[in-house]
Amino acid sequence: MNILIQGGRLIDPASGFDGRADVAIAAGRIVGIGAVADFASDRVLDASGLVVAPGLVDLSARLGEPGHEHEGMLESELAAAVAGGVTSLVCPPDTDPVLDEPGLVQMLRSRAERLGAARVLPLGALTRGLEGKVLTEMVELTDSGCVGFSQAEHALKDTQVLQRAMQYAASFGLTVWLRPNDPWLGKGVAASGALATRLGLSGVPVLAETVALHTLFELARSTGVRLHLCRISSAAGLQLVAAAKAEGLPVSCDVSINSLFLTDTDMGYFDSRMRLEPPLRQQRDREALRRGLAEGLIDALVSDHTPVKEDAKALPFAEAEPGATGLELLLGLTCKWATESGLGLLQALERVSSGPARVLAGSLGPTQTGCGQLAVGALADVCIFDPEAMGAVEPAALRSRGRHTPFEGHSLPARVRWTLVGGQIAYEG
């Protein structure tokens, strides 16, 4: 279908363009921007008063697949993605079963493609079963469609195994994605501090992140591996990332929408919606993360979408399953951050489009070229939204099967009107 997007404010962070322009789409790609009056369209989308932006690229979204425990969950979570303007998302390997075999990866990608919703980019398991003992066949998993390798929330305790995994990945130019969290220091359920102590909750000190970062950077220096750090959570951790980047290590990092907006005080009296990984830290950490994202030290903002069942959250705080829904909130929270920081939409949208696309650039194959940008020849992954439309976050209205969010009741901007994936309308609201 040939589609003409007409009269909108086109914002393309990859090129720095922010102005009025039409967009012509044919055969799944953008074929014209600007003066496209002679374009023969099958459908015209009136974007007057709306923003036309690249489809969002989310580097952390769990889907509960390919196992059968959550039957139908892939459909619901990908529907949530496109409703939130997300057109490409990275899925961690801690599915059921774990993504440690090429067949499982192929099955997930095949099912996602048939749904015609958001594009799923899976991470393969770094070790078999995420048990931290035996390395997976990373090359075979890459050939099956994996864009990197991770342990998800399963810390790799054996440093020698981690070193060998990095050596293997580096020798084939693969990227290792890890959340820095020392397995011995990071066993608590809340950030260490006065509040956790007062509530009697086991704490996770900042040291759990910084000790892990020191180890990862030493191994990265010795192996030359490309390293992506998932969900940095502390000011001290961010300082170490800054030093590593200044040194020239091939390192990138992201931050969760939860850590960008919330602090440990939001836990109140044991609110299990705030039971998250990494745990919410203090205000000084949140402010440092906001500065780091604004200045470009942090490469991407992620939803950290982790749908949790009702009965898994209806437990005492320390026993509740960590996680929250986020796919449908990523755009609204990004726009809210843009307003609060004074950064502007162009720079803010960069952190959820071309920024994460650059993180993926070394791993994506030729069929993914053009992700996260609006340019002639690029994939026609487009998010068209009303930046002025405000709406309250209502769990019952969310498309995700995970209805728990720490942002329940918050008023957020940016209502998505259309989401296009590969030139096809995947969502219309």
Image (cartoon, rainbow, N blue to C red):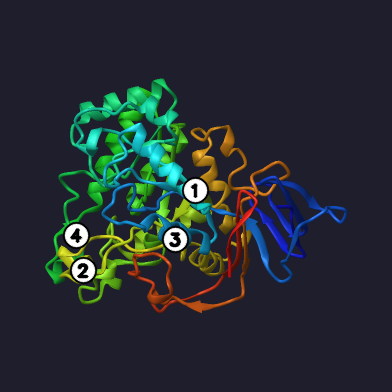
Q: Position of residue 54 (x, y in %)?
A: 62, 53
Density class for disc 4 (Cα within 10 Å; few <14, some 14-19, many ≥20) is many
| Residue picked out by circle 1 | 114
Disc 3 or disc 1, which is closer to the eye?
1
Q: Foreground residue, 108 or 341?
A: 108
| Residue picked out by circle 2 | 311
Q: To which quarter of the image does residue 163 belong?
A: top left
Q: Position of residue 288 (x, y in %)?
A: 41, 57
Q: Earlier in the sequence, mark 3 or mark 1?
A: 1
The amino acid pointed to by label 4 is Val
Q: CA distance from mark 3 to mark 2?
A: 21 Å
Q: Foreground residue, 3 or 261?
A: 3
Q: Earlier in the sequence, mark 3 or mark 2?
A: 2
Density class for disc 2 (Cα within 10 Å; few <14, some 14-19, many ≥20) is few
Q: Foreground residue, 86 or 19?
A: 86
Q: Please, what secondary structure does the residue beneath circle 4 have? A: loop
